[in-house]
Image (cartoon, rainbow, N blue to C red):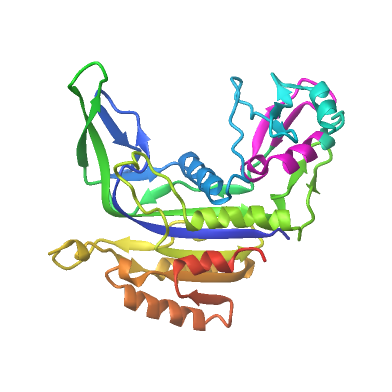
Amino acid sequence: MGHFIHFNSVLRVNLANLNSSEGAGNQITLKKITTFNGAEFVYVSGQAYRRYIRESIYWMSNGEFNICGIDKDGSPIIKVKKSDGEEVEVVKSKKIQQDKLKELGIGKFDNYQAFMNFLIRQEPELDMFGFLLPISEKAIGHTRKASPFQVTPWISCFPYNYNSDMMTRSKAEEQAGDIVKIELDAFNYMQGAQIINVDLVGGYWDEHEEALVNVFEPDSEVKKKRVNWLIEAMQNPAGGSKKARLLNDFSPVLVAGAKQNTGVVYFNNSFEILPPEKEIKSLKDVKGILKLEKFIHDFNSAKNFIEKLYIGINPHEFANGEEAVEEIVRFSKNHNGLVEVCETPAEVFDKLKLI
């Protein structure tokens, strides 16, 4: 059986332009989806969130995690550092620079497996986020790896309420500037799910032999570090459009995290959050009501595939937070150690790190 780590998270939006879309004229719009009845819900694309995670890992790893960049053909740029710190590009215009490899003392890549092993060892980003790299040498051909880190879009729990702000685009040659309208999401919740295929981190699916190849041993420190980088970044993600002036906390306020033997996001959008019922007199009253019935039903349907489930909630972020904690505790007691309640959402991520 496979080894997967699954998170379903809820974050609380205060005031943010989370993921900009294309707007007409001087307007920066939010990405939105429209339901059958015409209601619009804000979403953050999986592509944007994966970029937030990638950049978060870069800053958290003190430069150990390198972001490759892409060339004009859309292929990752593969460089190797020499002993003096100079970076040498070893793949250029779909060709392996064999003379450069010789200078670096790496040796010749004359087959698919040797080149794939090199990429997984050399570039943590490509190992963790996947890649497509066509190579002109016939013995190697197209190389690619499906990402072991897969995500759903984040989708708002409440419909979009058409909030906006204004900004000015200054022009160096003029004292004035263009007035631009920015759409904002305010006092909302967003929900999304993520899967890490642990077996594919530090390895790849050999498309010639149709088999999993482990470049690093399953219990190696390199593999653990890369999986933990992903988990730590989801714990402390840094991202969002226009964050220089609309900075939002992207860390979850509610998390269900599971070790499981399938790659299915069983709890995607399982947490139902309803608008507040009482009269709103201040910002502290702008909190949703958390309903757990669907989550519990979804868990009972999938529990045969789950090794362990951890749940953490910040009760202060929900109108019925204390009652929700009590219900979660009762739910955990009904499952004989299969479910563990954590003190905070951050603790869920800590519990699922590889040690």
> In the picture shown, does residue 218 fall above or below 307?
above
The stretch drawn in magenta includes residue 288: no
Can residue 177 be seen here? The reply is: yes
Q: Can residue 265 be seen in this view?
A: no
The boundaries of the magenta stretch are 115-144
- Compared with residue 74, is residue 145 higher up or lower down, i.e. above or below? below
Occupied quadrant, residue 249? bottom left
Front residue of this view, candidates 193 and 52: 52
Q: Nearer the viewer, residue 236 or 331?
A: 236
Instruction: Locate residue 320 relative to residue 221 in the image: left or right.
Output: left
In the image shown, does 184 or 59 lie closer to the viewer?
59
Is residue 208 rendered to the left or right of residue 343?
right
Picture quadrant of residue 17 = top left
Residue 172 lies, in percent from the top left, at: 27, 20
The residue under the point 57% across, 69% down is 351
Above-or-below relation of 248 to 314: above
- Give whichever of 303, 232 is nearer the camera: 232
Q: Residue at x 42, y 64 (%)?
A: 254
Q: Which residue is drawn at 42% across and 66% down?
A: 294
User: In x, y percent, where is residue 68?
Assistant: 61, 34
Quadrant containing the N terminus in the rendered view? bottom right
Inspect the magenta stretch and tell me whether residue 141 lies in it. Answer: yes
Q: What residue occupies the far front of the structure in this picture? A: 84
Residue 150: percent from left, percent from top: 57, 48
Q: Where is residue 30 in the image (x, y as percent from the top left)?
A: 32, 38
Count of picture labels:
0
Quadrant in the rendering for residue 291: bottom left
- Left or right of 63? Residue 49 is left
Quadrant where the image shows the C terminus = bottom right
